[in-house]
Image: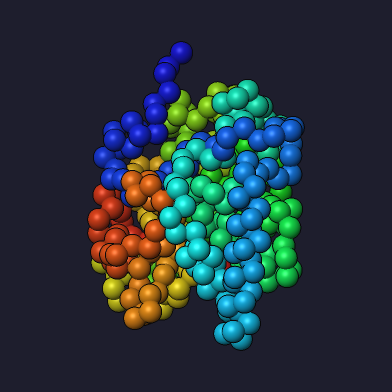
Amino acid sequence: MKTSLSRRELLKRLGLGAAAVALPFPLSAGPAPGSVLDRLVSTLDDTDEQRLAEWSSTVRDQARQLGTMTTGVRAVRIGELAVGTPYEAFTLESYIREGGNPVQREPLALMLTRFDCVTLVESCLAIARASSASAQPSWQQFGREVERMRYRGGRRRGYASRLHYFSEWISDGENRGLVRDLGEELGGIADPRPLRFMTEHRQSYPALASDSVFREIASMEQRLDKQVRFMIPSDRIPRMMDRIESGDILAFATGIPGLDVSHAAFAYRDSSGTLRVLHAPLSGGSVEITRATLPEYVSNIRRATGIMVARPLRG
């Protein structure tokens, strides 16, 4: 049997820098208590629920003071509260490594005390929406908001029902009123390359050891051939930066064969209006707001070709 490459090893072979963290790799959390295979929600630390209560209360207080806040602005306010939270890779799939069946309904992994880049985006948006709807959102409400973003059509089934390619995360969310894809209106160009990264690196995905799951992922990749992806090239970013709002979702497009993006984050405007990046970086070890501006940040990502941009909606 072919030995699986570690994620760090594969990143190295692909020539990616430390900023590249959103490859559609198996992401996993630690073992959930109780029934691992089908808990609606799981928390590994009381601090998770404490953070939900505190962060929700803080953003609601700020919204009352300002009179109104968009979903994106709410999300970056929560992201500010998350600054310093440790980065942890493989936060969604430990159930497979522990013997879980990727064909069966996937457990919903939730955490607010550690993030990778995508779970940071999902968690901030989930709290933004849940706190808008409820004065004191429950862990279950938070979980439902994450679930409807993370899975195709908002329906959590097996491993293949998860939105592994971030461009599909955007398009599926747009179809359901969760985000608005801004790529085309911001002057983006179509990226026609077929997405085959997962099936071409089967050995790096434990779930794809299942032939049926492999076939489902292959079918999903082929369906995405019909979906147009709009990417703003790196050299055009400075000309349209003023149209990006704080709280917009950024996906960093890559030239890696078979892959759409290598990282996900929030656009963040500081007090002077400078556009920066709020994200969970692989190398930094914790959630941060970059010192670099958005164009500077993109220029420092090896093999980056541009960005995809989506605006969060209330949903």
Task: Give the residue drawn at x 56%, y 71%.
Answer: 74
- In this rendering, the answer to whether 273 lies above or below 229 is below
Q: Is residue 143 left or right of residue 284?
A: right
Quarter of the view holding residue 4: top left
* Residue nearest the viewer, comparing 87 with 221: 87
* Residue 301 point in image, percent of width and height: 28, 53
Quarter of the view holding residue 201: top left
The colour style of the image is rainbow
* Residue 294 point in image, percent of width and height: 32, 66
Task: Give the residue drawn at x 34%, y 49%.
Answer: 284
* Residue 265 point in image, percent of width and height: 44, 59
* Residue 57 point in image, percent of width and height: 64, 69
Residue 194 visible in the shown view: no
- In this rendering, the answer to whether 307 lies above or below 60 is above
- In this rendering, the answer to whether 179 lies above or below 44 is below
* Residue nearest the viewer, comparing 128 with 10: 128
